[in-house]
Image (cartoon, grey):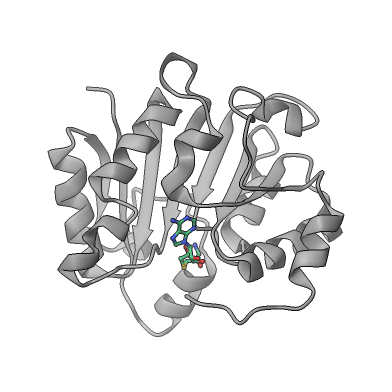
């Protein structure tokens, strides 16, 4: 998903340093200080326009959320919503999911209690495998910043990316908590929060896949 640049995006981001950080450095171990109080911390990589993370923050006031997004125009759309809502448990980051270990502390100090990937770009060409957010180098970074029993939740409409991710996560030694081949008709899932993409695709009759997994054996 590529959004057209928005003239107002950069000034809005610069005007709200209390809500959004740009490629944050030296934040490792200090993320809880960005919120009004410390709570379990959940990260979404590739939030798009933010429908999912905003709804999650509203329905889970007992958790803190970070929306990480690469595109300035997209994260500015989330910021616009947050300027109006002022949710105390939502923070935004303009940055790259490939740099997670620059942003969050690793290992024993792992700060992340749960990580979401929603409708990540499929990068179908084999030569672009390394850009897929479930490629092993990304999994390695997720593992580094997540607490040992934290869950990774991945949703997609793309069968190719789903199958690839299943294999990649399995090879990495992850344990699956849920594999759903048709999320919207899956009786095991009762608390699904749809994303923008998800609503669009399922309205057209498309099938949604979901994986939930963790790193600890
Ligand atoms: N999650 C949203 C958007 C899906 S489109 C939804 O379901 O509606 C995928 C999004 O991931 C795009 O907005 C894209 O800019 C973002 N993205 C892709 N690679 C990324 C990366 N390495 N780091 C952060 N965001 C990324």
Q: Identify the residue shown where x is 55% and y is 38%.
A: 42
The residue most toward the top is 108
Q: Position of residue 92 (x, y in %)?
A: 67, 49
* Residue 165 visible to an observer of this rendering: yes
The residue most toward the bottom is 204
Specify the quadrant of the image occupied by residue 108: top left
Q: Identify the residue shown where x is 65% and y is 79%.
A: 5
* Residue 141, above or below 156: above
Q: Identify the residue shown where x is 70% and y is 38%.
A: 61
Name the residue nearer the viewer: 162 or 105: 105
* Residue 212 visible to an observer of this rendering: no
Q: Position of residue 62 (x, y in %)?
A: 67, 32
* Residue 96, above or below 143: below
Left or right: residue 14 versus residue 140 is right
Left or right: residue 127 versus residue 186 is left
Left or right: residue 89 versus residue 166 is right
- Count of numbered circles on the image: 0
* Residue 74, above or below 58: below
Which quadrant: the C terminus? Answer: top left
Name the residue nearer the viewer: 23 or 60: 23
Q: Position of residue 46 (x, y in %)?
A: 49, 58
Specify the quadrant of the image occupied by residue 137: top left
Q: Position of residue 23 (x, y in %)?
A: 61, 47
Left or right: residue 188 versus residue 193 is left
């Amino acid at each position: 998903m590529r959004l057209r640049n928005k003239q107002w995006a950069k000034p809005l981001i610069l005007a709200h340093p209390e809500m959004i950080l740009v490629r944050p450095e030296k934040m490792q171990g200090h993320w809880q200080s960005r919120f009004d109080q410390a709570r379990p911390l959940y990260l979404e990589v590739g939030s798009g326009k933010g429908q999912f993370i905003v709804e999650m923050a509203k329905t889970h006031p007992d958790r803190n959320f970070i929306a990480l997004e690469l595109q300035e125009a997209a994260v500015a759309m989330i910021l616009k919503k947050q300027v109006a809502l002022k949710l105390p448990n939502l923070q935004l980051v303009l940055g790259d999911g490939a740099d997670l270990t620059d942003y969050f502390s690793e290992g024993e100090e792992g700060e992340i209690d749960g990580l979401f990937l929603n409708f990540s770009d499929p990068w179908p060409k084999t030569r672009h495998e390394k850009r897929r957010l479930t490629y092993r180098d990304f999994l390695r970074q997720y593992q580094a910043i997540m607490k040992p029993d934290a869950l990774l939740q991945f949703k997609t409409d793309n069968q190719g990316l789903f199958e690839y991710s299943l294999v990649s996560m399995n090879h990495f030694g992850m344990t699956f908590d849920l594999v759903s081949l048709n999320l919207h008709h899956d009786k095991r899932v009762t608390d699904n929060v749809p994303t923008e993409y998800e609503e669009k695709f399922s309205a057209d009759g498309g099938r949604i896949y979901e994986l939930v997994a963790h790193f600890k054996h």
